């Protein structure tokens, strides 16, 4: 199964390299499909590639990536044990926010990646990845809270890049990782004891635990 997932993710990565579903590819150096353990139980989803990510074709390799690596290690995990990707797979010009049309165009790739990996826990980093699961919820009201949505747990957190610009956000991000350290380190045990959401049809029907 591990090999099958690895091959499937590799095939998606190749398709992302050739993707022309929106115009973000134009002017970029590399697509940034994502990387990590194909059978990861924890997935981190950011916003989109930046300068360093575009240059190397890898997610979270700049200063925000170094902070994310440090936070992952702080809860007893390593980068090799998780999967890291973004909502959009090509760098937006001047690192601007992704447009709704660009997010929609890239949705098919993220959908396929999550279907293959089938994580127990998904950590959304920033408001754009949070909006994928909870489009009408503000990150300031739910950050750090484990939310059961359908058959998985979503933990909204601030984006590491925002934390680098704001000390208060950094402290909140660090605290959110520590608050959820057991859930991130042992997602099987934590998820199995979580109460299932009674309404799984509407992703905005949330169950907090």
Image (cartoon, rainbow, N blue to C red):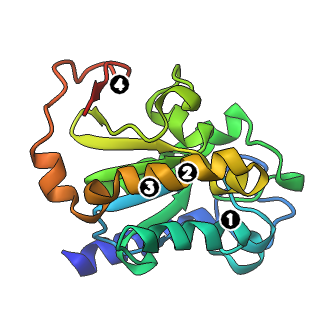
- Numbered circle sitting on residue 203: 4
Q: Which of marks 2 and 1 is nearer the N terminus?
A: 1
Q: For this view, does 3 lie left or right of residue 108?
A: left
Residue 204, position in %: x, y? 38, 20
Residue 127, position in %: x, y? 61, 37
Tell which tag, 4 or 2, sits nearer the viewer: 2
Residue drawn at (72%, 51%), measured in percent from left and top? 167
Cα distance in 3D space between marks 2 and 3: 6 Å
* Res. 181 image quadrant: bottom left
Residue bearing the label numbered 1: 64
- Numbered circle sitting on residue 173: 2
Q: Looking at the image, can residue 141 be seen? A: yes
Residue drawn at (73%, 58%), measured in percent from left and top? 164
Q: Is residue 14 above or below residue 161?
A: below
Q: For this view, does 151 lie left or right of residue 68?
A: left
Cα distance in 3D space between marks 1 and 3: 15 Å
Q: Are marks 2 and 3 in contact (CB under 8 Å)?
A: yes
Q: Looking at the image, can residue 87 be seen? A: no
At mark 1, the secondary structure is: helix
Residue bearing the label numbered 3: 177
Q: Earlier in the sequence, mark 4 or mark 2?
A: 2
At mark 2, the secondary structure is: helix
Tell which tag, 4 or 3, sits nearer the viewer: 3
């Amino acid at each position: 199964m591990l090999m099958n997932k690895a091959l499937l993710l590799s095939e998606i990565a190749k398709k992302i390299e050739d993707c022309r579903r929106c115009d973000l590819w134009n002017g970029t150096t590399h697509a940034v499909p994502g990387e990590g353990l194909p059978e990861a139980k924890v997935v981190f989803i950011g916003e989109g590639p930046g300068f360093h990510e575009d240059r190397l074709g890898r997610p979270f390799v700049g200063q925000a990536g170094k902070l994310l690596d440090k936070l992952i290690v702080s809860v007893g995990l390593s980068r090799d044990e998780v999967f890291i990707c973004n909502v959009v797979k090509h760098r937006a010009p001047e690192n601007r926010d992704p447009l709704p049309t660009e997010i929609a165009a890239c949705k098919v790739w993220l959908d396929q990646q999550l279907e293959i990996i089938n994580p127990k826990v998904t950590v959304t980093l920033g408001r754009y990845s949070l909006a994928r699961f909870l489009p009408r919820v503000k990150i300031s009201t739910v950050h750090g809270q484990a939310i059961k949505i359908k058959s998985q747990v979503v933990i909204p957190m601030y984006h590491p890049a925002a934390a680098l610009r704001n000390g208060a956000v950094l402290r909140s991000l660090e605290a959110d990782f520590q608050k959820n350290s057991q859930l991130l380190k042992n997602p099987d045990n934590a998820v199995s004891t979580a109460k299932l959401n009674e309404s799984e049809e509407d992703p905005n029907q949330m169950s907090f635990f």
